[in-house]
Image (cartoon, helix red, strand yellow):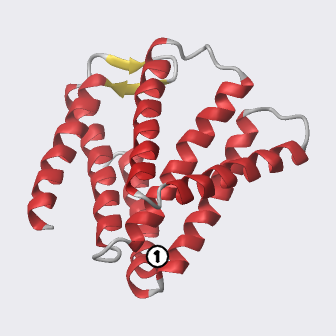
């Protein structure tokens, strides 16, 4: 087993059990609190990329991300608002992929700040909504399972078939073959999951 794969397996085992306990054995508000805590930590970490001149500005960035997540939550309380949040998020992820592939060096402090906010706030919203949606907790675990499966498949497909680099200046180890392999495996699992649910 390679060192990279060993670290991934150990990380999955270390985080998997607490995740299952939080999602299935504790009240939903505990999941929401855990998601918010992780989002705050992630926003603080992201703020270091921005090279802000003071800790106060970094804290202000964290507050802005939390406010965006709360606003998205309120907006998504009705179907039209949820569609808007999902649409904006989808457009952002397609834009982010194109940005990373074709213009990885064109990053300003403000575009990096926006990138972090648009990655963290919708992710937190999705985690909490999936936890509260019936059957409580199963959708969240299934969504995470899809992400893990895509990551593992991308790793193996990339190692076995990888030739064309996805974004060599950003992450030299990632390949288009890995991306396509991960997408194919997660799509098949999504189809199987849709039949199960």
User: Where does residue 23 sit, x and y in percent of width and height?
Assistant: 41, 77
Residue drawn at x 70%, y 20% as measured from the top left: 108
Whether 97 is drawn above or below 41: the answer is above
Residue 64 shows in this picture? yes
The image shows a total of numbered marks equal to 1
Q: Which residue is mark 1?
A: 18
Residue drawn at x 60%, y 61% as measured from the top left: 38
User: Where does residue 70 sit, x and y in percent of width and height?
Assistant: 62, 58
Whether 37 is drawn above or below 178: the answer is below
Residue 172 shows in this picture? no
- In the picture, which quadrant includes the C terminus? bottom left
Quarter-of-image position of residue 167: top left
User: Where does residue 103 sit, x and y in percent of width and height?
Assistant: 52, 13
Residue drawn at x 21%, y 46% as measured from the top left: 186
Whether 104 is drawn above or below 34: the answer is above
User: In the image shown, does 192 or 177 lie closer to the viewer?
Assistant: 192
Whether 8 is drawn above or below 112: the answer is below
Quarter-of-image position of residue 182: top left
Left of 95 or right of it: where is 44?
A: right
Residue drawn at x 35%, y 58% as measured from the top left: 144
Mark 1, Cα crowd under 10 Å, few <14 / some 14-19 / many 20+, is few
Q: Circle 1 sits in a helix, a strand or a loop, which is it?
A: helix
User: In the image shown, does 92 or 13 lie closer to the viewer?
Assistant: 92
Left of 90 or right of it: where is 184?
A: left
């Amino acid at each position: 087993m390679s060192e990279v794969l060993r670290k991934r397996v150990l990380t999955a085992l270390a985080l998997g059990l607490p995740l299952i306990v939080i999602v299935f054995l504790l009240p939903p508000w505990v999941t929401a609190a855990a998601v918010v805590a992780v989002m705050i930590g992630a926003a603080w970490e992201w703020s270091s990329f921005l090279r802000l001149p003071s800790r106060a500005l970094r804290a202000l960035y964290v507050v802005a991300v939390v406010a965006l997540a709360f606003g998205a939550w309120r907006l998504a309380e009705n179907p039209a608002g949820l569609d808007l949040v999902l649409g904006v998020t989808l457009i952002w992820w397609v834009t982010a992929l194109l940005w990373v592939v074709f213009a990885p060096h064109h990053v300003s402090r403000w575009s990096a700040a926006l990138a972090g906010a648009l990655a963290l706030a919708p992710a937190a919203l999705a985690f909490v909504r999936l936890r509260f949606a019936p059957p409580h907790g199963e959708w969240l675990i299934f969504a995470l399972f899809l992400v893990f499966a895509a990551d593992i498949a991308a790793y193996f497909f990339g190692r076995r078939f990888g030739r064309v680099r996805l974004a060599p200046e950003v992450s030299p180890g990632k390949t288009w073959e890995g991306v396509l392999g991960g997408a194919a495996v997660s799509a098949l699992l999504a189809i199987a999951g849709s039949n199960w649910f």
